[in-house]
Image (cartoon, rainbow, N blue to C red):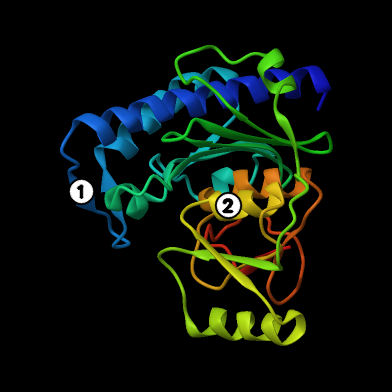
Amino acid sequence: MAIQDLDKLTLIAAQAALKGGIEILDVYNNEETRIVVKGDDSPLTQADTRAHKAIMELLEPTGIPILSEEGKHLPFEQRSSWKRLWIVDPLDGTKEFIKRNGEFTVNIALVENGAPIMGVVYVPVTGELYVGVRPYGSLKLTINAYAAITHEDLNRGAQLPLKVDRPFTVVGSRSHMNTETEEFLRSYREKYGEVSILSKGSSLKMCLVAEGLADVYPRFAPTMEWDTAAGQAVVEAAGFKMVEKDSRAPLRYNKKDLLNPHFIVL
């Protein structure tokens, strides 16, 4: 893809994430959250659906197919011909949204031939925006969601990873911790002695590794493609890896089964 096209799509994705964030905050701050349980027992709020609509209004004119958690999921026979697609989670961390701890994100990734080449992760409560574009790097900035984002805004972003003086740090989930993960942590304690545990919700866990605030993030619980595509783009563009637990191959996207394998970010 030409760099000019990728630049344009990056700005569109970032603006779409901000617009989705505005809708989420409107619900978060001003409305009683109504929760619906979906067929897979995961929660859905009106913030999810409003953010989805706002994001689609900006992504659909690009003409690139869209795979969104809250959209219509076409059969693989139709999706398999997509060489390029958007993968979107309008509200990642719905459980964190319901808990009102602020640790939820908007995730938008551009995937080409099964690999995420660009991703934006936006944190509505803080205004933090993570942007990763392979092979050009990752950055973080704080942005006013009501303003149009520009190339100048991106140029002011801090390049990731940051240099941070800290102990060996493993990042974990606020909502998912199991025996397999505990055993993984034990192996790192045996190797490094002091191991700090940093707990976060949503795709922020991937961004913490990209930012240089953590060394590794093991995920040995179910995730879907829209949970990880944008975070993987940020991680890889920052120079880190996000690989399947067993094969150590990078995670792939637009698969027949949209469920991810267990993975490690390092």
In the rendered structure, the answer to whether residue 33 lies left or right of residue 41 reads left
Q: What element does badge 2 sit on?
A: helix
Looking at the image, which residue is at 68% across and 73% down?
245
Crowd band around label 2 with a 10 angstrom C-alpha radius: few (<14), some (14–19), many (20+): many
Image quarter of the N terminus: top right
Q: Amino acid at mark 2?
A: Thr
Mark pair 1, 2: CA separation: 23 Å
Residue 102 percent coordinates (x, y): 39, 44
Looking at the image, which residue is at 48% across and 52% down?
202
In the rendered structure, the answer to whether residue 193 lies left or right of residue 86 reads right
Location of residue 183 (image quadrant):
bottom right
Q: Which residue is mark 1?
A: 35
Considering only order in the chain, which callout, 2 or 1, is on the residue closer to the N terminus?
1
Location of residue 196 (image quadrant):
bottom right
Q: What element does badge 1 sit on?
A: strand
Residue 191 percent coordinates (x, y): 76, 83
Residue 143 percent coordinates (x, y): 55, 23
Q: Which residue is mark 2?
A: 228
Looking at the image, which residue is at 25% across and 32% down?
29
Residue 47 percent coordinates (x, y): 30, 36
Residue 244's place in the image compared with 78, above or below, is: below
Looking at the image, which residue is at 50% across and 85% down?
179
Q: Residues at badges 1 and 2 in contact (C-beta under 8 Å)? A: no
Q: Amino acid at mark 1?
A: Ile
Residue 217's place in the image compared with 208, above or below, is: below
The disc at residue 254 is none
Image quarter of the C terminus: bottom right
| Nearer the observer, 44 or 152 | 152
- The answer to whether residue 253 is seen in the rendering is no
